[in-house]
Amino acid sequence: MTDARERGKRQKAFRLRQKERHQASERQLQELSDRVIALEHEREQLQRAVETATTDSQGIQPGSCGLDNDEIAAAFCLGEATVQMHLTKGEVRTLTVYAMADIWKTLVHKMGLSLDKVDAAPRNSRFRQRLKEIVHEALSFLWTLVLFNPNMLSLINTCNMEAPTESQCSTDEARDWPAILDCMQPTKKQAEQLMACRRMMLREVGALIAEWDRLWGELESIRDMEEKTQRAVINHVHSASLAERLRLNVRSLHTCRAYYQSYACNKVLSPVQTARYLVASYPMGPDTLSLMTCLAQQRGEPSTSELLQTARPRTAAAAYETRPHLCKALG
C-alpha cells in the first residue's frame, strides 16, 4: 500500500514537471510574439531614419502593402450550398479578438451539429461530406491568420471564445486532453505519426528560437555600442536589417506551428477525429501541440524541453537538414 502511494506521488510529481516545462515553452513563444510587435514599430522608425539619411528615393512607398485589402481571403459555406460569409485580406489584417472568437464559435457550432448527424447516421455520405467541408473551412481560417494576422493566430490557442475579454487560463488547465484523446480514438499508426510530427515540429521550433536568441543578442550589442556620428547611418541600416530578420523569424515560428497542426489534422487524423478534437476543445481554440504532448506523455516520449534542446545553436543546422525527410518521417 505504501509503495503504491509513493509511486502515485512520483507519477504526480513527474506530470507536474512535464506540465511546467510545457507551460514555460508556451510562455517563451508568447514572449517572442509580444516582442515582435515592438520590433515592427522600431523597424518602421529605423527605415524612416535610413531613408532620410541616405535620401533614397527608391524605397517602398507608404501604404503599398495594403493594395490587396479588398481581395477575398476566406469564404465560409458553414454546411450550406452557398457562401454564407467571407473575409477580405484587409478584414483579416484588422481582425479583433472579438471577431475572431465569433467566427470560431460559429464554425465549431456548425461542426458540432454536423458531427451529431454523422454519429446518428454513420453511413450517410452526405453528412460526412458536409462535416469534412466545415472542418476544411476551420483549418483554412487558421491558415488565413498565418498569412495575414499571425499575432491573432497566437491568441487562438489560449482564447476562451465565450469570454474573449477575460484573462485566459493555462492551456493545460482549460482542456481535458486525455478525455479529448479518448473521444478521438487514434489508431496505433496515427499515434506514431503524431509523435513523429511533434518531434519534427519541436526540433524546428527549437532551431528558430536559437536563431532568435542569436539575432536578438546581436541587436542588443549594437544598441549598447557608442557609435560615432559618421557611422550612425551604417548602424541604423544594420539594426533595421536585424529587426526585419527577427520579424521574419517570429513569422516562421507561427508558420511552423500552423504547418504541423495542419498536417496532423489533414493528413494524420480523419475529418471526424479532427471535428471531435475541435468540438471537445471548445470554448477554447485548438492547441495541437498540447494534444500531441499529452499523447507523448502517455507513450513515454521525450519531454517538450528535451526535444527543444536538440536544436541548440551548434545543432540547429542539423535540425534544418531534416526538413526534406518530413514526408518520410511522418509516413
Image: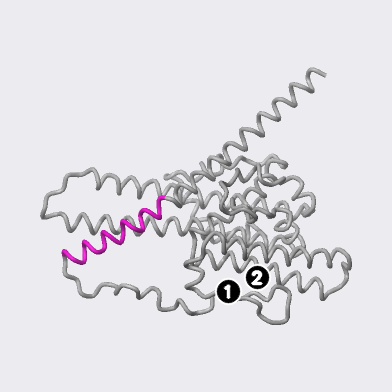
Q: Is residue 320 above or below residue 148?
A: above
Q: How far apart are the alpha carbons under marks 1 and 2?
A: 8 Å
Q: Nearer the viewer, residue 211 or 289?
A: 289
Q: Which residue is mark 2?
A: 137
Crowding near the residue tagged with mark 1, few <14, some 14–19, many ≥20 C-alpha atoms within 10 Å:
some
Name the foreground residue: 154 vs 103: 103
Residue 49 colored magenta? yes
Q: Amino acid at mark 2?
A: Glu
Q: Earlier in the sequence, mark 1 or mark 2?
A: 1
Q: Helix, strand or loop at disc 1?
A: strand
Q: Which residues are magenta?
A: 35-53
Q: Residue at x 49, y 64 (%)?
A: 149
Disc 1, disc 2: CB below 8 Å?
Answer: yes
Task: Determine if residue 80 is in view.
Answer: yes
Query: Which residue is at the front of the view, 194 or 89?
Result: 89
Would you place residue 155 above or below residue 72 in this image? above
The x and y percentages for residue 280 are 74, 54
